[in-house]
Amino acid sequence: MVDLGVDLGGLTLANPVMPASGTFAEGLDKAIDLDLLGALVIKTITRQRRTGNPVPRVCETPEGMLNSIGIPCEGMAYFHGTILPAYARFSPPLVVSISAPTVDGFADLAAEVTRPGVAAVEANISCPNLEEDGKAFALEARPTERAVAAVRGATGLPLWVKLSPNVTDIAEIARAAEAAGADALVVANTFLAMAIDVETRRPRLGAVTGGLSGPAIRPVVVRMVHQCHRAVEIPVIGCGGILTAADALEYVLAGASAVQVGTATFLHPTAMTAVLDGIAQYCMRHGVRTFTDLIGDLRTGEIDATDLEWAEPTA
Amino acid sequence: MVDLGVDLGGLTLANPVMPASGTFAEGLDKAIDLDLLGALVIKTITRQRRTGNPVPRVCETPEGMLNSIGIPCEGMAYFHGTILPAYARFSPPLVVSISAPTVDGFADLAAEVTRPGVAAVEANISCPNLEEDGKAFALEARPTERAVAAVRGATGLPLWVKLSPNVTDIAEIARAAEAAGADALVVANTFLAMAIDVETRRPRLGAVTGGLSGPAIRPVVVRMVHQCHRAVEIPVIGCGGILTAADALEYVLAGASAVQVGTATFLHPTAMTAVLDGIAQYCMRHGVRTFTDLIGDLRTGEIDATDLEWAEPTA
Amino acid sequence: MVQAMLSTDRADDRAQATGIPPATGKPAAEGACEVLSNARSNAEYLHLVLAAAPPLTAVRAGQFFQLRCPGGGPNAPFFRRPMSVYACDADRGRVEFLYKVHGVGTRGLAGLTPGDRLDLFGPLGVGFTLADGWRSIVVVGRGVGLATLAPLAELARGRGIGVSAVLSARAPELLMSVERFEEIGARVFTVTDSQRTSGPARVERLIRGLIAEGKADALFTCGSNRLLEMLQRLGRERGIPGQVALEQQMACGLGMCFCCVREFRIDGALAHRRVCWDGPVFDLQEALSW
Amino acid sequence: MVQAMLSTDRADDRAQATGIPPATGKPAAEGACEVLSNARSNAEYLHLVLAAAPPLTAVRAGQFFQLRCPGGGPNAPFFRRPMSVYACDADRGRVEFLYKVHGVGTRGLAGLTPGDRLDLFGPLGVGFTLADGWRSIVVVGRGVGLATLAPLAELARGRGIGVSAVLSARAPELLMSVERFEEIGARVFTVTDSQRTSGPARVERLIRGLIAEGKADALFTCGSNRLLEMLQRLGRERGIPGQVALEQQMACGLGMCFCCVREFRIDGALAHRRVCWDGPVFDLQEALSW
Ligand SMILES: Cc1cc2nc3c(=O)[nH]c(=O)nc-3n(C[C@H](O)[C@H](O)[C@H](O)COP(=O)(O)OP(=O)(O)OC[C@H]3O[C@@H](n4cnc5c(N)ncnc54)[C@H](O)[C@@H]3O)c2cc1C
Ligand SMILES: Cc1cc2nc3c(=O)[nH]c(=O)nc-3n(C[C@H](O)[C@H](O)[C@H](O)COP(=O)(O)OP(=O)(O)OC[C@H]3O[C@@H](n4cnc5c(N)ncnc54)[C@H](O)[C@@H]3O)c2cc1C
Ligand SMILES: Cc1cc2nc3c(=O)[nH]c(=O)nc-3n(C[C@H](O)[C@H](O)[C@H](O)COP(=O)(O)O)c2cc1C
Ligand SMILES: Cc1cc2nc3c(=O)[nH]c(=O)nc-3n(C[C@H](O)[C@H](O)[C@H](O)COP(=O)(O)O)c2cc1C
Ligand code: FES
Ligand code: FES
């Protein structure tokens, strides 16, 4: 038996596989047993009611997708009255993703979701879709620090901070979030992108730009997870383009303590449980008894003969 | 007949299609007629002789590739004695990409390549592979300005500056390059990335990290070209993941005056001439007589009925 | 002959449309199904028949599947494609689709040959509801919209409810599913553009006739904006209930991504609903034409 | 029967190996070729025969093509795959490859069936050279390496040069191309691991015998590091020239990307060369074992 448990900044998960915010809802229990997952992370909420962006809200790109869903939100009464109770019947810890246009707004919302039934808060300071003003907090170290500190002050729950990949130096932002009290980092949100229908000369998204996710982005985010892992002491949760167990393990070897699976669930609703099974199988095949032994176990020494085997396949 | 000519910061090209630096050499004339291209951009050179990075130097990713070629370089004598003469027999303007580890080094090299036969200088201030210290000039505005100003002072040739996509605010860097005297911008170089072979737990590249290119990155770079086009007056050359004429036209509508094709040539050696043909055909089909009319012609107004046709395909 | 194996959606499913998460989930499964045939129905439509086993065959009228359409390269269909079930026979283990080639995904479908495998995910969504007491219904559809309506007609006939089916097309040779509806036991009316019988005014006159005959306890439609508006008007005027099946681009098909929203007028106020989760079948009057 | 349609590389091509760009380019073309057959040769190797037209059939011994292997999804082979020409017949319009399934690209190749199309790009690279005056040569190869050496043997025989071919494998049933070499008119020696005849010492003794017989004006090999080292030693000791075909991962195949470099000892100094452009055939002594 492999021990798949992992401690994520004060919250212990039975295993390291969970959904990425905004790509999951309880409807997925039609397809998989949600109780198998390490945690349940729900779509980012805001205090304000919002309708989100105009359609089309998604489009396809090479091995990826763009979304400009925005954060449609039914408001707090709906959150407390409908969303929270809907998850009561599932056993994995519930992680609530929050977003706000101001530092105070972050603090207020963090306080408001600090309720029984909520196991951790994920501060989405990186969503590029918010209509407010423009730049997300996560694009620079100082605003990151302020937003994270505000949330930290408002809740005693484990605090995960989700970073944006649209930055020059993700390690610097990671350190700022850690310094301000984050218990774990989620790396990363989507890449700001756009696509154009050349026949109509119009943007393919109603909101013109949106976030790129899916396998296409994985190599860039794996690099960022590796940098964050080396920059901070707190655990890093890898997120971006994970489709298979091998993809998830790439993140783990680069330094992730757990992974979030987003877009893949749209393509294969059973993606998360398949990733989980595959990780367990990998551990057995490689004689790994404790999953956490794999975290950051990237080997960068001199390349030895076996690695060059492909250069002499017929020998 | 469509007029495909375009003026790029003082250099007039017969058409807007050219190779991306480092993905082209004169050997391609085995496969296509190089005289059909708008310009010939050669692999970045440095003054120092360098051997480049350890193998493996490339690997495959979803709809993309990583490279850690580095800038292997045979030195200046070889450049003047062998490379320059080899291109003398081709008619398109020759653009020489240069890189250096210091501001003075950039100036010296720019002066040294300002020779008959060289039509423009492309300053590669964004290559993430240089061994020197680390951060490339292109990651921040001030170093960008300094490097560009040095090159500007050292050569009277049209000066193209190639930006890095690994930045928070590409428009800011674009403005810095423009202010320092760039005649055109190339947007963009590769995304710093990594990939791991989970069976061996080793990086797939000998140099651990490398640059992501190919279709996967296109939506992010199109967004950056759009931002740069709105931020500066000088022409922008789009580069990243162009495989077909439609991809190239996406860049043009987003604001690019010309395009560079890189990775696609590895997959289809005839990619550049196919892109060129496709652009001409598009212009004819859409009644566009002057290619330059398409630059930045993205339509973002209210969506009208025809765009919603897919919502009622059977009507 | 296709046997009726479709059931209706119960009221507790309908409750999902209010946004309240369902207390129990009916399973939706992912499965690779063998292609039994994939033949052209006419110049525009293809008919795909797959071998399928439970739970894939536990389909209710109006539900859909998300199909993983074949294709490779940078323009491969990345998302699944939503497709209404045209027929389903749990006993014989068959699921059928009727589709039109539109873009890269449906082009991939058209390339399937018997023996190939296609990955289905479903059945998904909230289907049609037949109220107790309805004796006759009218279904009005055009093109592939008829794929969605055929299982409804079949379900109604199975319960002894009379079905008048108004089938519309550009030209007689493009009329779809006439035999399927006749086999089901529907009274079929065909209208076409080329015969100038398909305009809203003509169709309205036809339906007013059916209402007058007492054959229209409820109105059902799918796909066409003009038909929707006309039926809404008739429904309001004559107090006849109805339902409409809507389409919208979908990524997840499970209510998770919120890309498939449309606006509805619910109790007088505008509200967003997810077509994949709260629908694709909605109350005729709540839907907004577009 | 495969007819000899291969020529040698001329000295002006060899000059490319010095890094000086060639004055004239021999064309390389991209073309979709029909698969005529793709059959298993033995438990490990497949033999792919394609219909091809000029300039694709203007192949010289030792040259290779870049194959766009079929496959879809996120693990599709993104790069082309380099593959030596095993046989080429311009008159009949055939290009043939011999390959081993190794990873995703060659697995895609193995799925090809007659009538499918495969996109080839080539022919590429600098092939083998036969010097005037050579009367007999020795070729030593193992596994798919023999694919590269067969056209050389054919070319030599076509010029009346005697060929001794030492074919190596793990076991007799895995021996490749024995008939092809016999048909060509080579004197074939088979050595295998299971018979304990393939060790470097045994092979060395065999070749020393051929040298003693005066049958070794030049030595050629491909693929195995141990064979390379042994032949280099013999060559140096006895002053016998030779050539080796090398492999390296390739993206462009045209000398553009510099991913396929290897180190060579040229005039005593270490230097990088691109296997796709300066090779894949190199001077036996300049190559470094790895
Ligand atoms: C619930 C539902 C049931 C459907 N049933 C059928 C059916 O039975 N037969 C049939 O032929 N078609 C049906 N459609 C429409 C079908 O989904 C589209 O024709 C198909 O998605 C087009 O994909 P494509 O790749 O060929 O086109 P592309 O234009 O290349 O598709 C690009 C994107 O737009 C989406 N898209 C394009 N048109 C539509 C559309 N009309 N509805 C939703 N998304 C669209 C695609 O899914 C894809 O994400 C149904 C749609 C829905 C929502
Ligand atoms: C000039 C030349 C001629 C060749 N001729 C033959 C031949 O006739 N028959 C044959 O079976 N094989 C030959 N090879 C080897 C063949 O190219 C590889 O087996 C093939 O590329 C493996 O691809 P894959 O996707 O199956 O393996 P993967 O391991 O999935 O490939 C991953 C990457 O590594 C590269 N790679 C892996 N092994 C090799 C290798 N040995 N050489 C170069 N690149 C490699 C692939 O091209 C790809 O880029 C030749 C190689 C070269 C360079
Ligand atoms: C449709 C969609 C909606 C998303 N909504 C949110 C969101 O509300 N909050 C958030 O933090 N991230 C959101 N994301 C980003 C994902 O959580 C994830 O960071 C990103 O998609 C990369 O992972 P993936 O490649 O596995 O999808 C969304 C992504 C998608 C595709
Ligand atoms: C193998 C390889 C080598 C490259 N070398 C250089 C280089 O020397 N200088 C440079 O400015 N860009 C270099 N690039 C980046 C390309 O010029 C281009 O910016 C990038 O690949 C994105 O374009 P693409 O997606 O069309 O390839 C290289 C890219 C590749 C793939
Ligand atoms: S398709 Fe994702 S919510 Fe409807
Ligand atoms: S494969 Fe590109 S230089 Fe050899």
Image (cartoon, coloured by chain):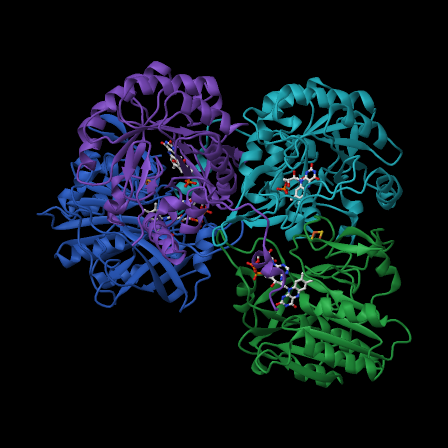
Chain colours: A cyan, B purple, C green, D blue
Above or below: residue A47 compared with residue B278: above
> In the rendered image, which quarter contains the N terminus of chain A?
top right
Foreground pick, A157 / B250: B250
Position of D289 with respect to B35 (left or right) is: right
Foreground pick, B167 / D71: B167
* Quadrant containing ligand 1: bottom right
Position of C280 with respect to D67 (left or right) is: right
Above or below: residue B308 compared with residue B91: below
Q: Position of residue C53 (x, y in %)?
A: 72, 68
Is any atom of residue C122 visible in this view? yes
Foreground pick, C154 / B24: C154
**Residue under the image location 67 percent in, 58 percent down:** C248
Above or below: residue B69 compared with residue B149: below
Position of B315 with respect to B148 (left or right) is: right
The residue at the far right in this view is: C133
Foreground pick, D265 / C282: C282
> In the rendered image, which quarter contains the C terminus of chain A?
top left
Q: Where is residue C55 in the image (x, y as percent from the top left)?
A: 76, 65
Q: Position of residue C237 (x, y in %)?
A: 82, 70
Q: Where is residue A110 in the image (x, y as percent from the top left)?
A: 81, 28
